[in-house]
Image (tube, rainbow, N blue to C red):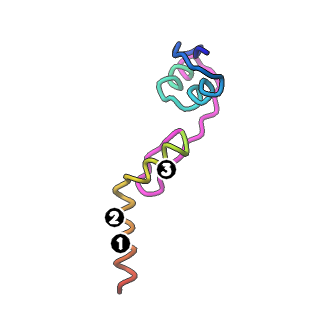
Amino acid sequence: MECDFCNKIFCSKSSLNVHQKSAKYCLKIQNANHIEIKIVNFKCEYCDKIYTSKQQLYVHYEVCKNKEIENRIDINKKEF
């Protein structure tokens, strides 16, 4: 399966669909071609970074430094 926008090749229709809804460079091409797309964004509650999939957001949570800082502040508040 080939993406109509960026010509990248995929082995399945579902992979192509995920790509067309989440790959930032492909979304930019779609937007430049004035194609109406629904973009769902997932925002980190600690640092406000935006991701195009929940999976990317959850991976980010593992390394988000602001999350670690906030957790330390919460622990310190509980000690007092």
Q: Does residue 65 appear left or right of residue 61 in this picture?
A: left
Tag 3: amino acid: Tyr
Residue at the location (52% across, 19% down)?
29
Q: Which residue is mark 3?
A: 58
Query: Total number of numbered labels?
Result: 3
- What is the crowding at mark 3: few (fewer than 14 residues within 10 Å), some, or many (at least 20)? some
User: In the rendered image, which quarter is residue 68 located in?
Assistant: bottom left
Q: Amino acid at mark 1?
A: Ile
| Side of 30 where 73 appears, left or right | left
What's the mark number on residue 73? 1
Comparing 10 with 44, the one in front is 10
| Residue type marked 2 | Ile
Indicate whether residue 37 is drawn in magenta: yes
Q: At numbered mark 2, what does the secondary structure look like: helix, strand or loop?
A: helix
Please identify, in this view, whether the residue under mark 3 or under mark 1 is nearer the observer: 3
Secondary structure at numbered mark 1? helix
Disc 2: which residue: 69
